[in-house]
């Protein structure tokens, strides 16, 4: 009886132990499956985060590149406009130096400096094409303004602008369209000079 009881106890113990092992193995398997699923889910989320970060970075880079391109295009356009406004082309030089009102202002300023510098009389050479507009002004207003004799000659060799000198001819200042272009062209590169002045 003792043996049977011991056998029964051992049998129950072994069955309980086997059941416990099975249950433990099942729990362990479930835990492993959950761990693998958690790892897969974590990897998936990490991949999503990396993909989103890469997408955001690419979008930001694309936007920054577009902004830089737009800003550089605008800066280039503004610079071109500034250069266009600063550089006097052949056509604009000819237009300015053939404008009687512009010439009157320049001549008046230069002639005043001549007289203030000790010149007792002034000799002008002006474009023949502007003789009708400038001769009365030179003889009446300019001579009166300077309180000094002013002699004007008109030449077909000058398309625009003027030359001015004391009547003794010791020196002269040339402000013709050609000298004005030459002055500006002196500071330009050959390609720019050719583009602007056709040289």
Image: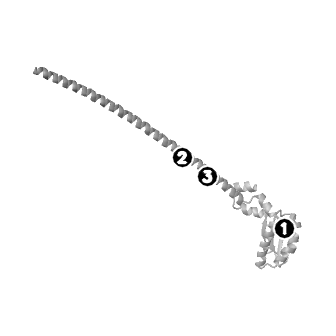
Return the x and y of residue 191 as percentages of the image width and height. Answer: 70, 54
Return the x and y of residue 44 as percentages of the image width and height. Answer: 43, 36
Q: Nearer the viewer, residue 58 or 31?
A: 31
For residue 126, the mark is: 1
Mark 3 or mark 1: name the one nearer the start of the chain: 3
The residue that disc 2 covers is 60
Residue drawn at x 88%, y 70% as measured from the top left = 135
Q: What's the CA distance linking mark 1 and mark 2?
A: 64 Å
Q: Is residue 110 above or below residue 52?
A: below
Under circle 1, the secondary element is strand
Q: Which of 61 and 163 is in front in this view?
A: 61
Q: In which quarter of the image is residue 163?
A: bottom right
Q: Callout 1 environment at 10 Å: few (<14), some (14 to 19), or many (20+)? A: many
Q: Which of 37 and 199 is in front in this view?
A: 37
The residue that disc 3 covers is 71
Residue drawn at x 68%, y 55% as measured from the top left = 80
Q: In this view, does 31 lie above or below 186?
A: above
- Left or right: 80 in relation to 123: left
Return the x and y of residue 20 as percentages of the image width and height. Answer: 24, 28
Mark 3 or 1, closer to the camera: 3
Image quarter in which the C terminus is found: bottom right
- Left or right: 130 in relation to 34: right
Return the x and y of residue 37 as percentages of the image width and height. Answer: 38, 33
Task: For residue 82, say whether it is visible.
Answer: yes
Under circle 2, the secondary element is helix
Mark 1 or mark 2: name the one nearer the start of the chain: 2
């Amino acid at each position: 009886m003792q043996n049977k009881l011991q056998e029964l106890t051992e049998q129950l113990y072994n069955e309980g132990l086997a059941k416990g092992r099975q249950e433990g193995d099942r729990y362990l398997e479930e835990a492993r499956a959950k761990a693998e699923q958690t790892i897969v889910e974590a990897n998936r989320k990490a991949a999503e985060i990396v993909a989103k970060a890469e997408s955001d970075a690419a979008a930001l880079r694309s936007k920054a590149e577009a902004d830089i391109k737009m800003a550089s295009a605008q800066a280039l356009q503004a610079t071109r406009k500034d250069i266009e406004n600063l550089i006097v082309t052949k056509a604009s030089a000819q237009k300015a130096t053939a404008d009687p009102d512009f010439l009157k202002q320049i001549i008046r300023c230069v002639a005043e400096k001549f007289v203030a510098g000790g010149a007792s009389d002034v000799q002008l050479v002006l474009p023949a094409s502007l003789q009708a507009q400038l001769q009365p002004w030179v003889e009446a207003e300019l001579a009166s303004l300077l309180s000094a004799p002013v002699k004007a000659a008109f030449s077909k060799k000058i398309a625009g602008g003027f030359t001015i000198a004391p009547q003794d001819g010791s020196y002269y200042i040339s402000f013709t369209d050609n000298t004005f272009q030459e002055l500006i062209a002196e500071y330009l590169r050959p390609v720019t000079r050719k583009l602007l002045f056709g040289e």
